[in-house]
Image: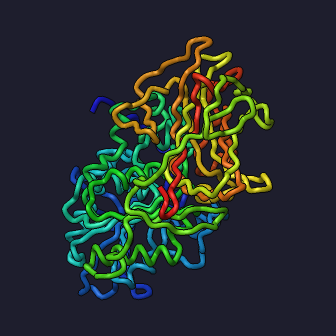
Amino acid sequence: MAFTYRFRDPIHSPLDFGGCPPNYRRYIEGGMLVERDVQVMMRDGARINVDLFRPADENLKVPPLIAWSPYGKHISTTAFLSRAYPTSGVDLDSLSKYTCFESPDPVQWVPKGYAVIVADIRGMWHSEGNATYISPKEMEDEYDLIEWAGTQPWSSGKVGLSGVSYLAVSQWRVAALNPPHLAAINPWEGWSDTYREVIYHGGIPSSFWPYMHDRWGKSTTRIEDLLKESEEHPFFDDYWRSKAAQLGDIKVPAYVVASWSDHGLHTRGTLEGFKKISSERKWLEVHGRKKWAYYYDPASLKRQTAFFDHILKGVDNEVLDWPRVNLEVRQKYYVGFTQTEKEWPIARTKYTKFYLNAEDLTLNKEAPLNPAQCSYNALGVGSTNNCLTFSYKCEESMDLIGHMKLKVYMQADGSDDMDIFLNVKKLNEAGEETRFAYYAQYDDGPVACGWIRASHRELLEELTTEFQPILAHQREQKLEPGSVECLNIEILPSGTRFEKGETLCVAIQGHDFNQYPIDQVYARHDNNTVNKGRHIIYAGGIYDSYLLVPIIPKSGTV
Protein backbone atom coordinates (compact mmCIF):
# COMPACT_ATOMS: atom_id res chain seq x y z
CA MET A 1 0.00 0.00 0.00
CA ALA A 2 1.90 3.04 -1.30
CA PHE A 3 0.16 5.67 0.83
CA THR A 4 -0.43 6.54 4.47
CA TYR A 5 -3.86 7.26 5.90
CA ARG A 6 -4.26 10.70 7.44
CA PHE A 7 -6.40 10.94 10.56
CA ARG A 8 -8.04 13.82 12.39
CA ASP A 9 -10.02 14.38 15.55
CA PRO A 10 -13.78 14.08 15.16
CA ILE A 11 -15.73 17.22 14.33
CA HIS A 12 -18.73 16.19 16.44
CA SER A 13 -19.41 14.20 19.57
CA PRO A 14 -21.94 11.40 19.15
CA LEU A 15 -23.77 12.80 22.17
CA ASP A 16 -24.56 15.94 20.19
CA PHE A 17 -26.68 13.82 17.86
CA GLY A 18 -28.28 11.42 20.32
CA GLY A 19 -25.57 8.78 20.11
CA CYS A 20 -25.40 7.45 23.67
CA PRO A 21 -22.61 5.14 24.90
CA PRO A 22 -23.29 1.41 24.32
CA ASN A 23 -25.91 0.00 26.64
CA TYR A 24 -27.06 -3.51 25.77
CA ARG A 25 -30.86 -3.91 25.93
CA ARG A 26 -33.11 -6.77 24.92
CA TYR A 27 -36.87 -6.56 24.63
CA ILE A 28 -39.83 -7.78 22.58
CA GLU A 29 -42.04 -5.32 20.73
CA GLY A 30 -44.60 -5.91 17.99
CA GLY A 31 -43.57 -9.53 17.52
CA MET A 32 -39.89 -8.58 17.18
CA LEU A 33 -37.03 -9.48 19.46
CA VAL A 34 -34.95 -6.31 19.60
CA GLU A 35 -31.36 -6.27 20.82
CA ARG A 36 -29.66 -2.88 21.06
CA ASP A 37 -25.91 -2.27 21.18
CA VAL A 38 -24.78 -5.81 20.56
CA GLN A 39 -20.98 -5.68 20.43
CA VAL A 40 -19.34 -7.74 17.70
CA MET A 41 -15.61 -8.46 17.83
CA MET A 42 -13.54 -7.82 14.71
CA ARG A 43 -10.46 -9.85 13.78
CA ASP A 44 -8.10 -7.32 15.39
CA GLY A 45 -10.04 -7.16 18.67
CA ALA A 46 -11.94 -3.92 18.03
CA ARG A 47 -15.66 -4.03 18.77
CA ILE A 48 -18.38 -2.49 16.65
CA ASN A 49 -21.93 -1.89 17.83
CA VAL A 50 -24.98 -3.27 16.06
CA ASP A 51 -28.72 -3.31 16.59
CA LEU A 52 -30.42 -6.61 15.87
CA PHE A 53 -34.09 -7.20 15.02
CA ARG A 54 -35.47 -10.72 14.53
CA PRO A 55 -38.63 -12.77 15.12
CA ALA A 56 -39.66 -13.18 18.76
CA ASP A 57 -39.85 -16.95 18.19
CA GLU A 58 -36.24 -17.85 18.88
CA ASN A 59 -36.69 -21.32 17.42
CA LEU A 60 -36.87 -19.80 13.96
CA LYS A 61 -33.71 -19.74 11.86
CA VAL A 62 -33.88 -16.75 9.56
CA PRO A 63 -31.59 -15.09 7.00
CA PRO A 64 -30.00 -11.83 8.20
CA LEU A 65 -30.03 -8.61 6.15
CA ILE A 66 -27.15 -6.29 7.05
CA ALA A 67 -27.17 -2.51 6.70
CA TRP A 68 -23.60 -1.20 7.03
CA SER A 69 -23.85 2.48 7.95
CA PRO A 70 -21.78 5.51 8.99
CA TYR A 71 -24.92 7.53 9.73
CA GLY A 72 -25.93 6.20 13.14
CA LYS A 73 -28.05 3.14 13.79
CA HIS A 74 -30.15 5.21 16.19
CA ILE A 75 -30.95 7.91 13.60
CA SER A 76 -34.58 7.64 12.47
CA THR A 77 -35.19 8.02 8.75
CA THR A 78 -38.49 9.77 9.36
CA ALA A 79 -36.99 12.36 11.70
CA PHE A 80 -33.95 12.97 9.53
CA LEU A 81 -35.76 13.30 6.20
CA SER A 82 -38.58 15.45 7.56
CA ARG A 83 -35.98 17.89 8.89
CA ALA A 84 -33.21 17.83 6.29
CA TYR A 85 -34.87 16.60 3.06
CA PRO A 86 -38.60 17.44 3.14
CA THR A 87 -38.86 17.11 -0.67
CA SER A 88 -37.48 13.55 -0.78
CA GLY A 89 -40.88 12.09 -1.65
CA VAL A 90 -40.58 9.33 0.95
CA ASP A 91 -43.90 8.34 2.54
CA LEU A 92 -42.67 8.84 6.08
CA ASP A 93 -45.94 7.59 7.60
CA SER A 94 -45.25 4.16 6.09
CA LEU A 95 -41.95 3.71 7.97
CA SER A 96 -41.48 2.58 11.55
CA LYS A 97 -39.43 4.34 14.20
CA TYR A 98 -36.84 1.55 13.82
CA THR A 99 -35.98 2.49 10.24
CA CYS A 100 -32.46 3.90 10.09
CA PHE A 101 -31.35 6.23 7.31
CA GLU A 102 -31.10 4.43 3.95
CA SER A 103 -31.66 1.08 5.70
CA PRO A 104 -34.41 -1.56 5.53
CA ASP A 105 -37.33 -1.15 7.94
CA PRO A 106 -37.24 -4.02 10.50
CA VAL A 107 -41.00 -3.80 11.01
CA GLN A 108 -41.50 -4.62 7.33
CA TRP A 109 -38.84 -7.36 7.14
CA VAL A 110 -39.01 -9.29 10.41
CA PRO A 111 -42.61 -10.48 9.85
CA LYS A 112 -41.45 -11.79 6.45
CA GLY A 113 -39.01 -14.10 8.25
CA TYR A 114 -35.79 -12.08 8.24
CA ALA A 115 -33.42 -10.59 10.76
CA VAL A 116 -32.21 -7.03 10.23
CA ILE A 117 -28.79 -5.93 11.51
CA VAL A 118 -27.84 -2.25 11.46
CA ALA A 119 -24.17 -1.57 12.23
CA ASP A 120 -22.23 1.50 13.29
CA ILE A 121 -19.01 1.09 11.32
CA ARG A 122 -15.57 1.14 12.95
CA GLY A 123 -14.67 4.49 14.47
CA MET A 124 -18.13 6.00 14.00
CA TRP A 125 -20.40 6.88 16.89
CA HIS A 126 -19.26 4.55 19.71
CA SER A 127 -17.77 1.72 17.67
CA GLU A 128 -14.10 1.18 18.47
CA GLY A 129 -11.04 1.79 16.28
CA ASN A 130 -10.19 4.56 13.84
CA ALA A 131 -12.64 5.23 11.03
CA THR A 132 -11.60 4.77 7.41
CA TYR A 133 -14.09 4.99 4.59
CA ILE A 134 -14.61 2.40 1.85
CA SER A 135 -11.15 1.12 2.74
CA PRO A 136 -9.71 -2.41 2.78
CA LYS A 137 -9.75 -2.33 6.59
CA GLU A 138 -13.40 -1.32 6.73
CA MET A 139 -14.26 -4.10 4.30
CA GLU A 140 -12.51 -6.64 6.54
CA ASP A 141 -14.84 -5.48 9.30
CA GLU A 142 -17.95 -5.92 7.16
CA TYR A 143 -16.65 -9.35 6.11
CA ASP A 144 -16.31 -10.25 9.82
CA LEU A 145 -19.84 -9.06 10.58
CA ILE A 146 -21.22 -11.11 7.69
CA GLU A 147 -19.49 -14.19 9.04
CA TRP A 148 -20.71 -13.44 12.57
CA ALA A 149 -24.29 -13.05 11.31
CA GLY A 150 -24.09 -16.22 9.24
CA THR A 151 -23.01 -18.37 12.19
CA GLN A 152 -25.37 -17.24 14.95
CA PRO A 153 -27.74 -19.88 16.42
CA TRP A 154 -30.78 -17.99 15.08
CA SER A 155 -29.30 -17.56 11.56
CA SER A 156 -30.15 -19.63 8.50
CA GLY A 157 -26.54 -19.17 7.39
CA LYS A 158 -27.38 -17.15 4.27
CA VAL A 159 -26.69 -13.42 4.63
CA GLY A 160 -27.96 -10.60 2.43
CA LEU A 161 -26.90 -6.96 2.18
CA SER A 162 -29.35 -4.09 1.72
CA GLY A 163 -29.31 -0.30 1.72
CA VAL A 164 -28.88 2.88 -0.30
CA SER A 165 -25.84 5.04 -1.14
CA TYR A 166 -22.94 4.37 1.29
CA LEU A 167 -24.77 1.19 2.28
CA ALA A 168 -24.61 0.16 -1.39
CA VAL A 169 -21.05 1.36 -2.03
CA SER A 170 -19.79 -0.95 0.72
CA GLN A 171 -21.65 -3.87 -0.85
CA TRP A 172 -19.50 -3.68 -3.98
CA ARG A 173 -16.35 -3.63 -1.88
CA VAL A 174 -17.11 -6.45 0.55
CA ALA A 175 -18.78 -8.70 -2.03
CA ALA A 176 -15.50 -8.72 -3.96
CA LEU A 177 -13.96 -10.48 -0.93
CA ASN A 178 -16.53 -13.29 -1.25
CA PRO A 179 -17.31 -13.97 2.44
CA PRO A 180 -18.49 -17.61 2.70
CA HIS A 181 -21.85 -16.73 4.29
CA LEU A 182 -22.70 -13.87 1.92
CA ALA A 183 -25.45 -15.15 -0.37
CA ALA A 184 -27.07 -12.06 -1.95
CA ILE A 185 -26.50 -8.33 -2.44
CA ASN A 186 -28.91 -5.55 -3.36
CA PRO A 187 -26.80 -2.46 -4.16
CA TRP A 188 -29.35 0.36 -4.38
CA GLU A 189 -27.53 3.25 -6.02
CA GLY A 190 -23.91 3.20 -4.93
CA TRP A 191 -20.76 4.49 -6.61
CA SER A 192 -18.01 1.97 -7.28
CA ASP A 193 -15.08 4.30 -8.18
CA THR A 194 -14.72 7.04 -5.56
CA TYR A 195 -12.27 9.13 -7.60
CA ARG A 196 -14.11 9.26 -10.93
CA GLU A 197 -17.68 9.23 -9.68
CA VAL A 198 -17.60 11.43 -6.59
CA ILE A 199 -14.41 13.37 -5.87
CA TYR A 200 -12.88 14.36 -9.23
CA HIS A 201 -15.60 14.60 -11.88
CA GLY A 202 -13.64 14.62 -15.12
CA GLY A 203 -10.65 15.77 -13.07
CA ILE A 204 -12.50 18.71 -11.41
CA PRO A 205 -12.31 18.58 -7.60
CA SER A 206 -15.72 18.24 -5.99
CA SER A 207 -17.04 20.64 -3.37
CA PHE A 208 -19.33 17.86 -2.15
CA TRP A 209 -16.50 16.12 -0.27
CA PRO A 210 -16.19 18.77 2.49
CA TYR A 211 -19.86 18.23 3.29
CA MET A 212 -19.27 14.50 3.74
CA HIS A 213 -16.08 15.29 5.67
CA ASP A 214 -18.36 16.95 8.22
CA ARG A 215 -21.21 14.46 7.99
CA TRP A 216 -18.91 11.49 8.59
CA GLY A 217 -17.50 13.17 11.67
CA LYS A 218 -19.32 11.77 14.71
CA SER A 219 -16.88 9.68 16.72
CA THR A 220 -15.11 9.13 20.01
CA THR A 221 -11.87 8.06 18.31
CA ARG A 222 -10.05 9.28 15.16
CA ILE A 223 -11.39 9.70 11.64
CA GLU A 224 -9.80 9.49 8.22
CA ASP A 225 -8.99 13.00 7.01
CA LEU A 226 -10.66 12.88 3.63
CA LEU A 227 -9.94 16.50 2.72
CA LYS A 228 -6.23 16.27 3.34
CA GLU A 229 -6.01 12.95 1.52
CA SER A 230 -7.90 14.19 -1.54
CA GLU A 231 -5.55 17.19 -1.75
CA GLU A 232 -2.51 14.91 -1.45
CA HIS A 233 -3.81 12.54 -4.15
CA PRO A 234 -5.00 14.65 -7.12
CA PHE A 235 -4.50 11.76 -9.56
CA PHE A 236 -5.80 8.19 -9.60
CA ASP A 237 -3.21 6.29 -7.56
CA ASP A 238 -3.02 3.51 -4.97
CA TYR A 239 -5.01 5.59 -2.49
CA TRP A 240 -7.99 5.94 -4.84
CA ARG A 241 -7.50 2.41 -6.11
CA SER A 242 -8.06 1.23 -2.53
CA LYS A 243 -11.46 2.94 -2.60
CA ALA A 244 -12.54 1.42 -5.92
CA ALA A 245 -14.36 -1.89 -6.05
CA GLN A 246 -12.79 -4.92 -7.72
CA LEU A 247 -16.05 -5.61 -9.50
CA GLY A 248 -14.86 -8.59 -11.52
CA ASP A 249 -14.26 -10.53 -8.29
CA ILE A 250 -17.94 -10.40 -7.32
CA LYS A 251 -19.73 -13.70 -7.87
CA VAL A 252 -22.70 -13.50 -5.48
CA PRO A 253 -26.26 -13.08 -6.87
CA ALA A 254 -27.11 -9.38 -7.20
CA TYR A 255 -30.24 -7.29 -7.67
CA VAL A 256 -28.79 -3.94 -8.75
CA VAL A 257 -30.90 -0.77 -8.76
CA ALA A 258 -29.70 2.45 -10.39
CA SER A 259 -31.33 5.70 -11.45
CA TRP A 260 -30.95 8.25 -14.22
CA SER A 261 -31.32 10.96 -11.57
CA ASP A 262 -28.15 10.65 -9.48
CA HIS A 263 -25.50 12.04 -11.83
CA GLY A 264 -22.23 12.90 -10.16
CA LEU A 265 -22.91 10.52 -7.29
CA HIS A 266 -24.32 7.05 -7.92
CA THR A 267 -25.63 6.63 -11.49
CA ARG A 268 -22.33 5.81 -13.19
CA GLY A 269 -20.94 3.55 -10.48
CA THR A 270 -24.10 1.48 -10.08
CA LEU A 271 -24.31 0.80 -13.79
CA GLU A 272 -20.58 0.05 -14.00
CA GLY A 273 -21.08 -2.33 -11.09
CA PHE A 274 -23.78 -4.31 -12.87
CA LYS A 275 -21.81 -4.35 -16.11
CA LYS A 276 -18.56 -5.62 -14.59
CA ILE A 277 -19.53 -8.04 -11.80
CA SER A 278 -19.00 -11.73 -12.58
CA SER A 279 -22.24 -12.92 -10.97
CA GLU A 280 -24.12 -15.43 -13.10
CA ARG A 281 -27.40 -14.43 -11.46
CA LYS A 282 -27.70 -10.66 -11.68
CA TRP A 283 -30.54 -8.29 -12.48
CA LEU A 284 -30.55 -4.57 -13.22
CA GLU A 285 -33.36 -2.10 -12.66
CA VAL A 286 -33.00 1.58 -13.61
CA HIS A 287 -35.56 4.24 -12.72
CA GLY A 288 -35.85 7.99 -13.23
CA ARG A 289 -37.14 8.96 -9.81
CA LYS A 290 -35.93 10.05 -6.37
CA LYS A 291 -33.78 7.31 -4.88
CA TRP A 292 -34.92 7.20 -1.24
CA ALA A 293 -38.59 7.37 -2.21
CA TYR A 294 -38.04 4.60 -4.75
CA TYR A 295 -36.23 2.36 -2.23
CA TYR A 296 -39.07 2.58 0.30
CA ASP A 297 -41.89 2.44 -2.27
CA PRO A 298 -44.20 -0.57 -1.63
CA ALA A 299 -43.67 -1.91 -5.15
CA SER A 300 -39.90 -1.75 -4.66
CA LEU A 301 -40.21 -3.49 -1.30
CA LYS A 302 -42.17 -6.26 -3.04
CA ARG A 303 -39.33 -6.78 -5.55
CA GLN A 304 -36.67 -6.69 -2.83
CA THR A 305 -38.63 -9.33 -0.92
CA ALA A 306 -39.00 -11.52 -4.00
CA PHE A 307 -35.26 -11.34 -4.65
CA PHE A 308 -34.19 -12.19 -1.11
CA ASP A 309 -36.90 -14.87 -0.79
CA HIS A 310 -35.64 -16.50 -3.97
CA ILE A 311 -31.93 -16.35 -3.18
CA LEU A 312 -31.83 -16.64 0.62
CA LYS A 313 -34.84 -18.92 1.14
CA GLY A 314 -34.96 -20.86 -2.12
CA VAL A 315 -38.51 -19.77 -2.99
CA ASP A 316 -39.55 -20.29 -6.60
CA ASN A 317 -41.23 -16.99 -7.40
CA GLU A 318 -41.42 -14.17 -9.94
CA VAL A 319 -37.64 -13.74 -9.97
CA LEU A 320 -37.45 -16.82 -12.19
CA ASP A 321 -39.17 -14.75 -14.90
CA TRP A 322 -37.44 -11.42 -14.33
CA PRO A 323 -35.77 -9.91 -17.41
CA ARG A 324 -32.06 -9.34 -17.01
CA VAL A 325 -32.56 -5.57 -17.39
CA ASN A 326 -35.61 -3.43 -16.59
CA LEU A 327 -35.43 0.27 -17.55
CA GLU A 328 -37.68 3.27 -17.13
CA VAL A 329 -37.63 5.49 -20.22
CA ARG A 330 -38.52 9.00 -19.09
CA GLN A 331 -40.88 11.29 -20.98
CA LYS A 332 -41.22 14.05 -18.39
CA TYR A 333 -41.11 14.39 -14.61
CA TYR A 334 -42.32 11.10 -13.08
CA VAL A 335 -43.84 10.06 -16.41
CA GLY A 336 -42.31 7.26 -18.46
CA PHE A 337 -42.63 3.65 -19.52
CA THR A 338 -40.83 0.42 -18.73
CA GLN A 339 -38.59 -1.32 -21.23
CA THR A 340 -36.96 -4.72 -20.78
CA GLU A 341 -33.58 -5.65 -22.21
CA LYS A 342 -31.19 -8.60 -22.23
CA GLU A 343 -28.02 -6.72 -21.30
CA TRP A 344 -26.43 -3.41 -20.34
CA PRO A 345 -25.33 -1.45 -22.29
CA ILE A 346 -28.00 -2.36 -24.84
CA ALA A 347 -26.34 -4.34 -27.61
CA ARG A 348 -28.58 -3.10 -30.45
CA THR A 349 -27.84 0.57 -29.72
CA LYS A 350 -27.32 2.70 -32.81
CA TYR A 351 -24.72 5.26 -31.75
CA THR A 352 -25.41 8.39 -33.79
CA LYS A 353 -23.37 11.57 -34.24
CA PHE A 354 -24.97 15.01 -34.18
CA TYR A 355 -22.37 17.52 -35.32
CA LEU A 356 -21.97 20.92 -33.71
CA ASN A 357 -22.38 23.96 -35.97
CA ALA A 358 -20.58 26.93 -34.43
CA GLU A 359 -22.22 29.44 -36.80
CA ASP A 360 -25.88 28.88 -35.88
CA LEU A 361 -25.52 26.75 -32.70
CA THR A 362 -27.35 23.76 -34.15
CA LEU A 363 -26.77 20.01 -34.03
CA ASN A 364 -26.89 18.28 -37.41
CA LYS A 365 -26.58 14.78 -38.80
CA GLU A 366 -24.12 16.08 -41.40
CA ALA A 367 -20.85 17.75 -40.41
CA PRO A 368 -20.45 21.42 -41.46
CA LEU A 369 -18.04 21.79 -44.36
CA ASN A 370 -16.42 24.97 -43.15
CA PRO A 371 -14.75 25.49 -39.78
CA ALA A 372 -16.19 28.12 -37.48
CA GLN A 373 -15.91 29.14 -33.87
CA CYS A 374 -18.02 30.49 -31.03
CA SER A 375 -17.21 31.32 -27.42
CA TYR A 376 -18.51 32.03 -23.94
CA ASN A 377 -17.29 33.84 -20.83
CA ALA A 378 -15.68 31.07 -18.77
CA LEU A 379 -16.38 32.71 -15.41
CA GLY A 380 -19.70 34.40 -16.05
CA VAL A 381 -22.96 33.41 -14.43
CA GLY A 382 -26.52 34.21 -15.36
CA SER A 383 -26.57 35.38 -19.00
CA THR A 384 -26.63 33.78 -22.43
CA ASN A 385 -23.10 35.10 -23.03
CA ASN A 386 -21.88 32.62 -20.42
CA CYS A 387 -23.30 29.46 -21.99
CA LEU A 388 -23.49 27.96 -25.48
CA THR A 389 -26.40 25.67 -26.36
CA PHE A 390 -26.47 23.55 -29.52
CA SER A 391 -29.87 22.21 -30.58
CA TYR A 392 -31.52 19.62 -32.83
CA LYS A 393 -35.29 19.57 -33.44
CA CYS A 394 -36.37 15.94 -33.67
CA GLU A 395 -37.77 14.88 -37.03
CA GLU A 396 -39.09 11.67 -35.49
CA SER A 397 -39.32 10.20 -32.00
CA MET A 398 -36.06 8.88 -30.51
CA ASP A 399 -35.39 6.78 -27.43
CA LEU A 400 -31.95 7.71 -26.11
CA ILE A 401 -30.93 5.04 -23.59
CA GLY A 402 -27.34 4.65 -22.53
CA HIS A 403 -24.03 6.49 -22.70
CA MET A 404 -23.49 9.75 -24.54
CA LYS A 405 -20.22 11.46 -25.43
CA LEU A 406 -19.25 14.95 -26.50
CA LYS A 407 -16.19 15.17 -28.72
CA VAL A 408 -15.35 18.85 -28.96
CA TYR A 409 -12.42 21.02 -30.07
CA MET A 410 -11.80 23.88 -27.65
CA GLN A 411 -9.32 26.63 -26.84
CA ALA A 412 -8.73 28.47 -23.57
CA ASP A 413 -8.32 32.19 -24.29
CA GLY A 414 -6.52 33.65 -21.27
CA SER A 415 -5.74 30.43 -19.37
CA ASP A 416 -3.66 27.25 -19.56
CA ASP A 417 -6.56 25.04 -18.46
CA MET A 418 -10.34 24.73 -18.68
CA ASP A 419 -13.12 23.35 -16.48
CA ILE A 420 -16.04 22.48 -18.74
CA PHE A 421 -19.55 21.61 -17.58
CA LEU A 422 -22.25 20.32 -19.87
CA ASN A 423 -25.90 19.37 -19.63
CA VAL A 424 -27.97 17.47 -22.15
CA LYS A 425 -31.48 18.92 -22.15
CA LYS A 426 -34.89 18.24 -23.62
CA LEU A 427 -37.21 21.05 -24.77
CA ASN A 428 -40.89 20.53 -25.49
CA GLU A 429 -42.54 21.81 -28.69
CA ALA A 430 -43.06 25.20 -27.05
CA GLY A 431 -39.33 25.47 -26.37
CA GLU A 432 -39.65 24.99 -22.61
CA GLU A 433 -37.16 22.72 -20.86
CA THR A 434 -38.52 19.40 -19.63
CA ARG A 435 -37.20 18.84 -16.11
CA PHE A 436 -36.71 15.52 -14.34
CA ALA A 437 -36.24 14.17 -10.84
CA TYR A 438 -32.69 14.96 -9.71
CA TYR A 439 -30.86 13.28 -6.84
CA ALA A 440 -33.06 12.36 -3.89
CA GLN A 441 -34.81 15.68 -3.44
CA TYR A 442 -34.93 17.94 -6.52
CA ASP A 443 -37.41 18.34 -9.38
CA ASP A 444 -35.39 20.33 -11.93
CA GLY A 445 -32.76 17.99 -13.34
CA PRO A 446 -31.49 17.75 -16.93
CA VAL A 447 -31.40 14.68 -19.15
CA ALA A 448 -27.72 14.05 -18.38
CA CYS A 449 -24.48 15.69 -17.19
CA GLY A 450 -20.79 15.65 -18.04
CA TRP A 451 -17.61 17.35 -16.82
CA ILE A 452 -13.95 17.64 -17.76
CA ARG A 453 -10.82 19.53 -16.73
CA ALA A 454 -8.85 19.92 -19.93
CA SER A 455 -5.51 19.11 -18.29
CA HIS A 456 -6.97 15.67 -17.44
CA ARG A 457 -8.00 14.98 -21.06
CA GLU A 458 -5.65 12.01 -21.55
CA LEU A 459 -7.64 8.83 -22.19
CA LEU A 460 -7.15 5.43 -20.61
CA GLU A 461 -7.04 3.79 -24.00
CA GLU A 462 -7.43 0.18 -22.86
CA LEU A 463 -10.82 0.92 -21.26
CA THR A 464 -12.15 3.67 -23.55
CA THR A 465 -14.88 2.72 -26.01
CA GLU A 466 -16.57 4.60 -28.84
CA PHE A 467 -19.34 5.71 -26.50
CA GLN A 468 -17.56 5.93 -23.14
CA PRO A 469 -14.27 7.82 -22.86
CA ILE A 470 -12.39 6.87 -19.68
CA LEU A 471 -9.85 9.41 -18.47
CA ALA A 472 -6.50 8.16 -17.20
CA HIS A 473 -6.06 10.81 -14.46
CA GLN A 474 -2.33 10.07 -14.22
CA ARG A 475 -0.82 13.47 -14.95
CA GLU A 476 -1.61 17.10 -15.67
CA GLN A 477 -1.26 18.30 -19.25
CA LYS A 478 -1.58 22.08 -19.30
CA LEU A 479 -2.68 23.81 -22.49
CA GLU A 480 -0.22 25.62 -24.74
CA PRO A 481 -1.16 29.25 -25.52
CA GLY A 482 -3.36 29.36 -28.59
CA SER A 483 -3.65 25.57 -28.89
CA VAL A 484 -6.92 23.94 -29.95
CA GLU A 485 -7.40 20.66 -28.10
CA CYS A 486 -9.69 17.72 -28.79
CA LEU A 487 -11.67 16.80 -25.65
CA ASN A 488 -13.71 13.63 -25.20
CA ILE A 489 -16.26 14.20 -22.45
CA GLU A 490 -18.10 11.30 -20.84
CA ILE A 491 -21.80 12.08 -20.44
CA LEU A 492 -23.32 9.90 -17.76
CA PRO A 493 -25.96 7.33 -18.76
CA SER A 494 -29.59 8.29 -19.11
CA GLY A 495 -32.83 7.02 -20.59
CA THR A 496 -35.22 9.52 -22.22
CA ARG A 497 -37.74 9.62 -25.07
CA PHE A 498 -37.68 12.61 -27.42
CA GLU A 499 -40.87 12.97 -29.44
CA LYS A 500 -41.12 14.39 -32.94
CA GLY A 501 -41.03 18.19 -32.65
CA GLU A 502 -39.15 18.19 -29.34
CA THR A 503 -35.59 19.47 -29.14
CA LEU A 504 -32.36 17.77 -28.07
CA CYS A 505 -29.82 20.25 -26.68
CA VAL A 506 -26.30 20.17 -25.33
CA ALA A 507 -25.39 23.19 -23.19
CA ILE A 508 -21.74 24.00 -22.41
CA GLN A 509 -20.42 26.47 -19.86
CA GLY A 510 -17.73 27.08 -17.24
CA HIS A 511 -19.60 26.36 -14.01
CA ASP A 512 -22.28 24.12 -12.51
CA PHE A 513 -25.75 24.43 -14.03
CA ASN A 514 -27.74 23.69 -10.89
CA GLN A 515 -27.19 25.66 -7.68
CA TYR A 516 -28.56 24.35 -4.39
CA PRO A 517 -27.93 24.91 -0.65
CA ILE A 518 -24.46 23.72 0.37
CA ASP A 519 -25.82 21.41 3.08
CA GLN A 520 -27.56 19.23 0.49
CA VAL A 521 -26.24 16.15 -1.32
CA TYR A 522 -25.43 16.83 -4.98
CA ALA A 523 -22.42 17.13 -7.29
CA ARG A 524 -21.03 20.65 -7.09
CA HIS A 525 -17.77 22.46 -7.81
CA ASP A 526 -18.03 25.78 -6.02
CA ASN A 527 -14.55 27.11 -5.41
CA ASN A 528 -12.15 24.96 -7.39
CA THR A 529 -12.37 26.24 -10.95
CA VAL A 530 -9.25 26.94 -13.04
CA ASN A 531 -11.20 29.05 -15.51
CA LYS A 532 -10.18 32.45 -16.82
CA GLY A 533 -11.07 34.46 -19.90
CA ARG A 534 -13.15 32.81 -22.62
CA HIS A 535 -13.64 29.27 -23.87
CA ILE A 536 -13.72 28.96 -27.65
CA ILE A 537 -15.45 26.04 -29.42
CA TYR A 538 -14.37 25.02 -32.91
CA ALA A 539 -16.63 23.00 -35.21
CA GLY A 540 -16.80 22.13 -38.88
CA GLY A 541 -14.18 21.20 -41.45
CA ILE A 542 -11.19 19.63 -39.70
CA TYR A 543 -12.91 20.11 -36.33
CA ASP A 544 -15.40 17.25 -36.23
CA SER A 545 -17.04 18.25 -32.95
CA TYR A 546 -20.09 16.11 -32.28
CA LEU A 547 -22.53 14.80 -29.68
CA LEU A 548 -22.76 11.00 -29.79
CA VAL A 549 -26.16 9.70 -28.66
CA PRO A 550 -27.48 6.14 -28.06
CA ILE A 551 -30.58 5.65 -30.20
CA ILE A 552 -32.46 2.44 -29.48
CA PRO A 553 -34.14 1.24 -32.69
CA LYS A 554 -37.86 0.67 -32.57
CA SER A 555 -38.99 -2.93 -32.83
CA GLY A 556 -38.51 -4.24 -36.37
CA THR A 557 -35.99 -1.56 -37.39
CA VAL A 558 -32.23 -1.67 -37.70
Which residue is pictured at 57% across the width and 29% down the height? 544
Residue 439 versus residue 332: which sits nearer the camera?
A: 332
Q: Is residue 247 left or right of residue 486?
A: left
Image location (x, y in percent) of residue 89:
62, 68
Q: Is residue 425 above or below residue 328?
A: above
Q: Nearer the viewer, residue 199 or 431?
A: 431
Q: Is residue 419 above or below residue 207?
A: above
The quadrant where residue 317 appears: bottom left
Q: Residue at x 72, y 26 (%)?
A: 374
Colour scheme of the rendered structure: rainbow
Q: Residue at x 71, y 20 (%)?
A: 533
In the visual, does 452 lie left or right of 464? right
Position of 246 with respect to 489 (left or right) is: left
Furthest residue in direction top, as rendered: 481
Residue 152 horizontal/vertical position (percent): 22, 72
Closer to the camera, 332 or 190? Answer: 332
**Residue 427 position within the rendered picture, expressed as x and y whole percent measured from the top left:** 72, 52
| The quadrant where residue 313 appears | bottom left
Residue 267 can be seen in this image:
yes
The mark tally for this picture is: 0
- Residue ID at (70%, 48%): 393
Q: Quadrant of the N terminus?
A: top left
Spot occupied by residue 112 in the image (x, y as percentages of width and height): 37, 83
Q: Nearer the viewer, residue 27 or 61?
A: 61
Asked whether the viewer can see residue 102, the reply is no
